[in-house]
Amino acid sequence: MSATGAGDTSFTGSIPEIYDSLLVPMIFEEPARLLAAAIEAVDAVDILETAAGTGALTRVLASLGGHDIVATDLNEPMVTAAAARSTSPRVRWQVADARDLPFPDRRFDVVACQFGAMFLPDKVAGYAEARRVLRPGGLFAFNVWDRLETNAVAQIITDALCAAAPDDPLEFFRRTPYGYYDLDRIRDELAAAGFERITGEYLTATSHTTPETGAIAFCQGTPLRGEIERHPSLTLESATTIATTALRNHYGPHPFDAPIRWLQLTAHR
């Protein structure tokens, strides 16, 4: 598993809008529903969400009622986009770094994180910070993607772009979002941060999209966009075309379903 690269945590420009409108319904809604169900199973009022993005998990948690939610993200554009869509008076949005949370010790019943742990440069330190703000017995609930090979659309796009530029391959997906999936490693890192009663389960679902939408979502609505825009021989338009063609060749020109797989974890203070 490779280290996070420079720019891998940057969700700026038009990325938040594309991410929320295309990528969230494609791959984030079902994992958010299942993670929220795990949180709902415990008696919790005060919830901190880190790496909340544009609020896929936040919206599900808010719909359950009975929770006061502080939703945070490192990227101000994501927070701004999410806050503009937020309708619950029990959700407060703010910019915050999961590695250095601006909250006192033992402040929350739950810390939740939807597909954000992969971006932590120091996983143990990040987990220890989540534990710090949890009350005794509090729950840390989060998910991470499984390996790239179990998430078909991301793999097809990665393979196509790397084949188009073999001398300078675009490995963002393999490096970061789909590069942190080993359950034993994650358990060890959670334990090193002081967590107990650690559980983990691989879950599967399907994403529904079209070749055009899938290509735009992954190439233009994630930090892969920055890697493409810095590339010496590809442009955002050419990379999106390559990705669209690869998805059409694999699934045909019409809407299709593709597998996604992720790891859902819980740990207690």
Image (spheres, rainbow, N blue to C red):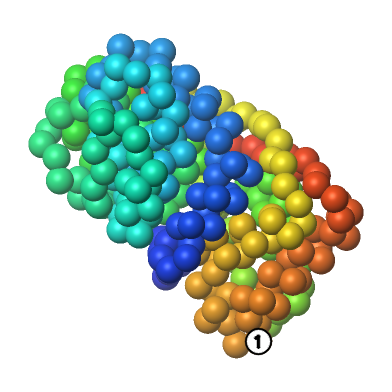
Q: Amino acid at mark 1?
A: Ser
Q: Quadrant of the C terminus?
A: top left
Circle 1 sits on which residue? 233
Please name the residue shown 58% across and 82% down the image.
Answer: 231
Please name the residue shown 48% across and 62% down the image.
Answer: 15
Q: Position of residue 13 (x, y in %)?
A: 43, 68
Local secondary structure at mark 1: loop
Please name the residue shown 42% across and 33% down the image.
Answer: 59
Please name the residue shown 38% across and 53% down the image.
Answer: 81
Vertically, is 220 above or below 60? below
Q: Is residue 59 visible?
A: yes
Q: Quadrant of residue 263?
A: top right
Vertically, is 229 above or below 54? below
Q: Give the class, few, some or many, for how many residues have Cα within 10 Å of label 1's Cα (few <14, many ≥20).
A: few
- Could you say which is closer to the camera, residue 33 or residue 191? 33
Q: Position of residue 75 (x, y in %)?
A: 33, 58
Q: Taking 83 as reference, is 106 left or right?
A: left
- Could you say which is closer to the camera, residue 145 or residue 247? 247
Q: Position of residue 101 (x, y in %)?
A: 20, 45
